[in-house]
Amino acid sequence: MSLFNLTAVIPAAGIGKRVGADIPKQYLQLLGKTIIEHSLEPFISHPEINKVIVSIAENDCWFRRLAVAEHPKIEIVNGGKERVDSVLAALQVINKNDYVLVHDAARPCIQRSDIDKLISSVRLAEKGAILASKVRDTMKRSSDSGNILETVDRENLWHALTPQMFLNKELITAIETAAEPQNITDEASAMEMSGMAVNIVEGRSDNLKVTREEDLILAELYLSQ
């Protein structure tokens, strides 16, 4: 697989309530640009990525106002209610033999070096892969009431990150044939359900997802460096 077409997919139809803002979190400002602009930039500028598909909500009134929306690599599609619906909507307009890199709109700190590492891994192994970081803290499982039930062994335990990279036709099939689609939390989980092997590529732990208000401060710190 020395040569293949690459397309990036950015699902951005979520509303991000946990951040506590009046607008979807991907449109909050970090260092003079929106979060989604930071998230898009490494894919738009990557010489091997031909196209970037952004899935937005039908009533989204923010994305098309951004200058990046006019970039020749950008294509916009309507997303769906769940993240997996937005991903699938983008996959349907991409050549089935392309490889796709699906990246969260609210991960603004992704670095080009990690994207290159992921592409190289998939190219070498001819197998889909995800970026992930090793769990370093002691892990606890709790009951619904908040009591600790057990300490979970952190050996071979990883935080799944994005982008996640797969052959488009295989990812489409995995999503459309999933026995429990409600349990698809990322692209790798869909592939796992279909019995496909997925590699892990160790990525940078500063590739954080903005979920809570305090993440904005940390993301700004990482981006400023």
Image (cartoon, grey):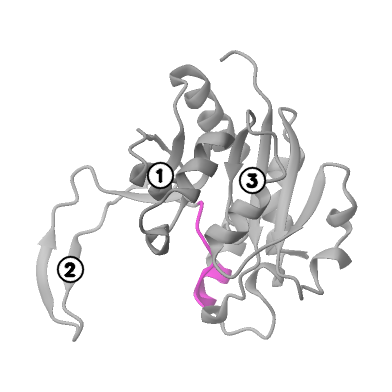
User: Splitting the image into 4 quarters, where does residue 151 fall?
Assistant: bottom left
- Residue 166 location (% of width, % of height): 52, 35
- Give the number of the disc on residue 91: 3
> Is 206 a magenta residue?
no
Report the Cα–Cα distance between label 3 and label 1: 22 Å
Q: Earlier in the sequence, mark 2 or mark 3?
A: 3
- Residue 9 location (% of width, % of height): 65, 47
The residue under label 2 is 141
Secondary element at tag 2: strand
User: Between tags 3 and 1, which lies in front?
Assistant: 3
- Residue 108 location (% of width, % of height): 62, 56
Report the Cα–Cα distance between label 2 and label 3: 35 Å
The residue under label 1 is 132
Q: Earlier in the sequence, mark 1 or mark 2?
A: 1
Q: Amino acid at mark 1?
A: Ala
Question: Mark 3–mark 1 contact, CB under 8 Å?
Answer: no
Start-end of magenta stretch: 207-217
In this rendering, would 91 be left or right of 192? right
Residue 164 appears anywhere in the view = no
